[in-house]
Every structure is written in C-alpha cells, then in structure tokens.
Amino acid sequence: MSQHQVSLPPTRSRQTERQSEGTQPRRGLGTWIRRGLVWMIAGVLALAVIGAVYQAVATEIDQRAYPPPGEMVDIGGHRLHVDCVGQGSPTVILESGLGNMSADWANVQPEVAKTTRVCTYDRAGTGWSQPGPEPRDPQQIAHELHTLLGNARIDGPYVLVGQSFGGLYVRMYAARFPKEVEGMVLVDASHPDMWTRLPPEVVATLKPPNWQVSAMTFLTRLGVFRLTGGDMAECGLPARQCKEEQAYFRSTRYRVTWGQEMLAPDRDAQVRATGGLGDRPLVVLSAGDHGRDFAAGVSGTSRIQFERTWHNLQNELAVLSTDSTHVVVEDAGHSTLQTDQEDAQVTSAAIDQVVEAVRTDRPLTR
C-alpha cells in the first residue's frame, strides 16, 4: 500500500492570529481618527480663507459705496481724511472718541457751521484715513493733526472739541501747540486717572486684556463680526452716516485701530503731564446716565459708584481752566451727546458758547 503525503499550507499559531485580530481594528480606528483630524483642519483652514476673502471683498465694496465726503490729505507716509464746512473764525476741530470716525459728528457739525468754520477729521486708521505709525498715543496723534491742519491750509486759531478719548488728544494738542488753541469743549471726556479710580467691575468691561483684543481682531479678519454684526440703520445719525458707520465698524481697520489706541503705552502719563489751559474758555459737558454704555450690565453698587466717580473726574477736568463751566446733561448717555438729536443740540450750543467767548474776548457766562 502506498502512502500519500498531503502537504498542508503553512498556518499561523492561534496566538499569532489572536494578535492579528486584536491589532487590526485598532490600526483602522487610528487611521480614521487621523483622517478625520486632517479633514477637520483642512475644513477650518478653508473656512478661514473663505472668511478672509469675504471680509476683504466686502470691505472693498463698502469703500466704493461710501467714498469720503471731504478730502484726503498727505501728511507724509499716509493720508488723513478731513471735511470742513462753514465760514468764520475761530475754526472748530472735532475729535472723535476711541476708534471712532468723523461721521459721529453728523448731528453737531451742521449746527456749528451756522456760526463758524468747523472741521471733522479721521485719525490714522479710523474712518477713511489710512493707518499710521505706532504707537497710537496722544503725542503721535497731536503731531499728525498739526501736520494735517498745516498741509490742508486750515488756519487757526482753533477751538478744540474732544469726545471720550478725543478729550485726551485735544488736551495734548493744546499743550504742544498752545498758541494755536483759543478754547476747548470736552464732551463726556476721558480722564487720565479713570482706570485707577473707577470701579474694577466697570474697568473690566471697558478695558479687555491684550489677548482678547488680539482674538477679536483675528475674528474680524475672518469676517465673523461682519456676519454677526447688527443693523445700524437707526443709529441716531442721518441715514447716510449710519450706513457709513456700519461699514466702518465691520472693517478690520476699526478693530486694529481700536486696539492700538486702547493699548497705547504711556497714553495716560502723557496727558497727565500736560498741565492746564490757563484762562482759555472751557466747557465740560457730562452725561448723567451711563447705564446704556459704560455701566451697562454691572451691579447696582458699581453703577452708583461709577456715576459718582465719573462726576468727580469731570469736575477735575473743569478745573483745567480758570474760565470754565461744567454742564451735566442728566438723561444723556456717553454717546448720545453726539448721536441723539436733542442731546447733540446741547453739544452744539456749548461749542457756540466757547466760539463767542473767543470772538468777544469775554469770560464764559457762569
């Protein structure tokens, strides 16, 4: 009988099979996780690129839809926007608040123009003006305004009007170029000591940390705030200016310039060292109700403390001149002294009062 040998295919041990069976699913899961992360990152990058392109294109469309109403003046390296109306002397220069633009004064400028020449302008990086060199501190801003007025042939003497942060800048201008300034109006203006004297709860809402400013700027570049921003059709200003402000506040330049001015080093120390105004006429206008802006969302105790401290700070601003008056507009808010037509009338009247005092060389009516 013959014997047949059967050749069997080589087999793996059961242990090897169990190892293979155990490792294959894990290797597949890891692959899917890696692939998922790659697709997720690619998706985020794609959205970022789309958002950045959207922001750039939409900004360009806005710029074409809302050209500057005044003229663009070269001050050496960049151009600033200035718009003057009216006739007469002294010339009133309107300085906007933190990161804000010249359209803020649309309720005030036409009224003042009935009395004298009045100019609005946009600081570097705000409104229609091109970005300028850092730091964006009071000394730099005052220097640029002086160059702008000279290059645009806007002759003095000047009555300077500063709202909010604009109050810091006009004080610096008066200190650096005192012979050009004959009077001043401070409209709910900032005080260089406000950050150390106001309630910490309020300061925390007004002055975000550096990382938050950077994050907000980054998100603006991606078009996030353009998509989520509200409609400013009823901002209190005329319809045209509301649209101009809406376009500007959705631009990346707004966020960048806001952060540069808010975080400018030595800003308050520079203003603190400026000294007083002598006997030049000065009107200090103060809002009486900050519940809709500065003190919005804070505790009742902090709000009461804020209003009391703010009033004291405004009183200190009035002491800058020996010829001054301090007017509290009880129902007005920080911004409504510009944007509300009734409150803006009070602002316009205060400017006219200082203009008349300069013209007649008489003290303000107390």
Image (spheres, rainbow, N blue to C red):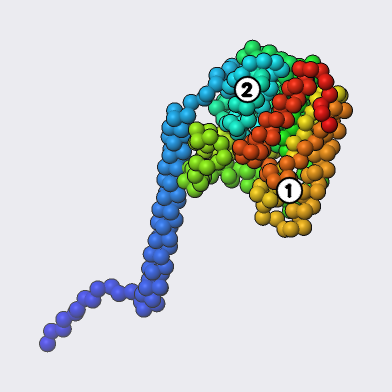
Decide which of tag 2 and tag 1 comes sooner along the chain.
2
Residue sitting nearer the eye, 33 or 204:
204
* Residue 30 in sight in this render: yes
Residue pictured at 77% horizontal, 48% vertical: 307
Image vertical order of residue 88 relative to residue 100, above or below: above
Q: Are marks 2 and 1 in contact (CB under 8 Å)?
A: no
Name the side, left or right, on which 172 lies relative to 51: right
Name the side, left or right, on which 109 lies relative to 220: right
- Identify residue for label 2: 113
- Give the residue type at disc 1: Val
Whole-percent x, y for residue 351 in the image: 71, 27
Distance, label 2 to label 1, CA atoms, is 37 Å
Residue pictured at 83% horizontal, 43% vertical: 312
The quadrant holding residue 34 is bottom left
Name the side, left or right, on which 28 lies relative to 284: left
Q: Tag 1, which secondary structure?
A: helix
Residue extending farthest left: 1
Name the side, left or right, on which 178 lies relative to 345: right
Q: Tag 2, which secondary structure?
A: loop
Mark 2: give few (<14), some (14-19) or many (20+) Cα within 10 Å.
many
* Residue 140 in sight in this render: no
- Identify residue for label 1: 203
Image vertical order of residue 179 relative to residue 266, above or below: above
In the rendered image, which quarter contains the N terminus? bottom left
What mark, if any, has residue 355 been given in the picture? none
Whole-percent x, y for residue 238 in the image: 53, 34
The quadrant holding residue 274 is top right
Image vertical order of residue 295 relative to residue 133, above or below: below
